[in-house]
Amino acid sequence: MLRRTTAALAGSVAALSLLATACGGTSGQDAPSGRATTGKVTFWSFLKGSDHVAEAFNRTHPDIQVTFETVPSGQEYYSKLTNAVKAGTAPDVAVVEYPHLPEFAAQGKIEDLSGTLGPVVKDRFPEAVRQLVDLGGRTWAVPRDAAPLMMMYRKDFFTAHRIAVPTTWDAYRNMTEQVRKADPDARGGALFTDNPGLLTALAWQAGGRWFDAGQDSWKVTLDDGPSKKTAAYWGDLARKDLVRSLSTLDPFWTSVQKNRTVAYVCASWCAGAHQATVPDQKGKWAVAPVPTWDGKPASAMYGGSSFVVPKGSRNSGAAAEFIKWITTDPEGMKAWVSSGTSSMFPADPALVPVTKAAFGTAYYGGQDVYAIGKASYDAIRPGWTWGPAMGTTNTALVDELPKVADGTVSLPEVLTVAERTTVAQMRQRGMRVTAP
């Protein structure tokens, strides 16, 4: 299923190259050889466990010294990385989530890795994942993880109040009503107002297709039927105060710590982030498959990351060595997960047992969260394509999301506004866009 999804992405990048004279940079065949694989490497990441990974690498690679710098997540980070590339102050290694990779490749902000890490990507990753980073016939990044959807819930709260774990979105609505009735201060979900990633994933799960690339033009439909259905559902939950409307930063985790959020939809990476942020609730939480509209398995990716060498890197040879280790080496995988802050689901299938063994199960009462992750990964709905201007799309969504809870705008209207903004930006960049 995922193969068809990523095949569409590969086609979209080919169209991006055609429409916007994209994918600038050195081709793999022309890539300089003999680059030094020693020296200093600057590493930017917002992923949990990145500091432990850098430390572990430095202990075992005395000829390369990695300096880790934490960066904010979301659009703020991508703007920061873009500005650093323009200013000539880019790091040597940086994280880029899959939705943003086509835009960074198209605008020439990252190095073509075809001649250095292309063979590694070809040898280590299945086609479905490989096509997320092999864009326009070139390799632009190395995958780290996938991010299948999951639901986190307080099993002690659910048991005490006889609330069933929902398997459909109708049941999820009932659950949120039961939660508020059981505790007026508690909620069974969250609508994030500063990050559209979850809304995007839920639209994907419902069957939405925001972007389609033809031979010489794009079709943009952020407000297609499945997406509008999803938006209307979550907008209604927010207006009725059945889920919290808040940012994805401290206010969310504070609500979890104070027992005010007792269930929420997230992805595989949330298991580690959750136990690291709320350690005192050990044994109280569990993980379940994400609800679906008809009760049949269906999922999507909420995030997922890769590593790139930004244009202007001062030590791309050593950067490539570091990227290879943190994405394909078993010791690198252990470093990500053993800190207890990361529950990443590896893009390299051979490393799933490594991460599963390194991630402790005590917090979730012995539950195998990786089994839930694999089932969700296998159920990812095909047909999704990331657009060529996701920075613009995400900014347009974030600009309007805070207005949903107070009733100023409806969530379906937010999608329509974001679609208009995206289309205008794409046309400004010289891309042909057809009407839905």
Image (cartoon, helix red, strand yellow):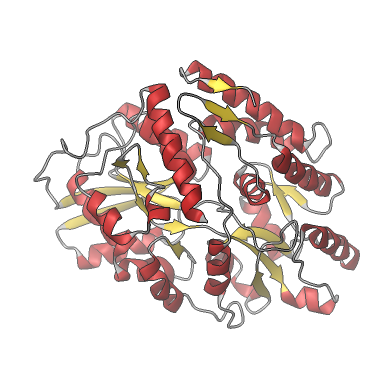
Residue drawn at x 16%, y 51% is: 39
Quadrant assignment for the C terminus: top right
Residue at 32% of width from left, 37% of height from top?
A: 110
Seen in the picture, residue 50 relative to 410 is either above or below; the reply is below
In the image, 89: left or right of 65?
right
Residue at 41%, 35% (x, y): give it. 13
Q: Residue furthest left?
A: 34
Could you say where residue 212 lies in the image, as x and y percent from the top left?
Answer: 54, 34
The image shows residue 347 at horizontal and vertical percentages of 41, 60
- Front residue of 79/424: it is 424
Spot occupied by residue 21 in the image (x, y as percentages of width and height) = 36, 23
Residue that sits furthest to the right in the current view? 181
In this orientation, which residue lies closer to the viewer: 68 or 13? 13
Question: Image quadrant of residue 282?
Answer: bottom right
User: In the shown orientation, is residue 169 left or right of residue 381?
Assistant: right
- Residue 82 seen from this side: no
Residue 170 percent coordinates (x, y): 82, 58
Q: Left or right: 273 with respect to 23?
A: right
- Is the residue 227 above or below the residue 217 in the image? below
Q: Could you say which is closer to the camera, residue 258 or residue 288?
A: 288
Q: Is residue 141 above or below residue 378?
A: above
- For residue 78, say whether it is visible: yes
Q: Quadrant of residue 367?
A: bottom right
At a point 43% along the width and 33% down the height, the residue shown is 103
